[in-house]
Amino acid sequence: MADWLQQLFSLLPEGGLYVLLIGLIACCESLVGIGLIVPGSTLTVFAGFLALHGKGDIGSIMCVAALGSFCGDVVSYWLGARFGPYLVTSRLLRRRIPLYRKTELFFLEHGGKSIFFGRFIGPIRGFTPFVAGGARMRPGSFLAWTTVSVVLWGLAYPGLGYVAGASWENVQDWTGRLVIFIGMALVITVLWIWGRRKIR
């Protein structure tokens, strides 16, 4: 194992506490407002990469990432249904009103499907459940859409890190791991920019 990985492992919590941390990160990224400052997707992908090298079980990480996302979505939905108008004008979200309005339009255009698609569009991930709650979307319909989305998200993001890590180990022709890391960062950046443009 590389020295930098050993040093990183020594800084991270062990066992159940580590898995709980992954779930908490996934939950926070799904919370309205807070999700904009928590790089949960990136950290979840990285957790999949670390699982390949022995830090946590990939199956447990996938499950807890999905569960954490589900909890965050439910909380955001409840906040939208209970305190939507008040929170939109609060200090937490006041500067995010343009993004909130774009999410509203996205929800009006796609209905329940926006819960699914919004899960994979970073800027509006925490806003779509909030908007759905404010729009009085039926709880049963919301739970159905969000369950499908978080299960796929929980499989895809840690899985991406795990598969990328395995490919990384098998690469022979590249000059170094830094090149692969830069390439992955570039792909994530392009997808993020594309997501923002779709909202606009």
Image (tube, rainbow, N blue to C red):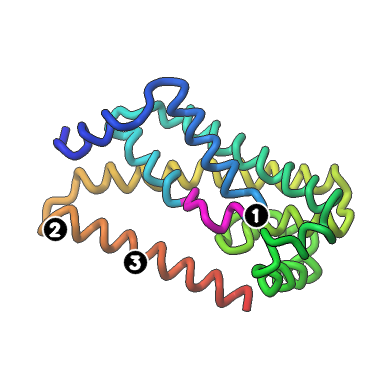
**Residue type highlighted by circle 3:** Leu
User: Picture coordinates of residue 50 (x, y %)?
Assistant: 32, 37
What element does badge 3 sit on? Answer: helix
Q: Which residues are magenta?
A: 34-41
Q: Earlier in the sequence, mark 1 or mark 3?
A: 1
Picture residue at 19% right of the left edge, 57% below the top:
178
Picture disc at residue 126? 1
Task: Give the labeled residue for mark 3.
Answer: 186
Picture disc at residue 174? 2
Say above or below: 63 vs 119. above
Please identify the quarter of the rendering in which residue 103 is found: bottom right
> Which image quarter is the C terminus in?
bottom right
Circle 2 crowding by C-alpha within 10 Å: few under 14, some 14–19, many from 20: few
**Residue type highlighted by circle 1:** Gly
Please identify the quarter of the rendering in which residue 1 is found: top left
Q: Earlier in the sequence, mark 2 or mark 3?
A: 2
Residues at marks 1 and 3 touching, judged by CB atoms closer than 8 Å: no
Circle 1 crowding by C-alpha within 10 Å: few under 14, some 14–19, many from 20: many
User: Picture coordinates of residue 78 (x, y %)?
Assistant: 80, 45
How far, Cα to Cα, is label 1 from label 3?
24 Å
How far, Cα to Cα, is label 2 from label 3?
17 Å
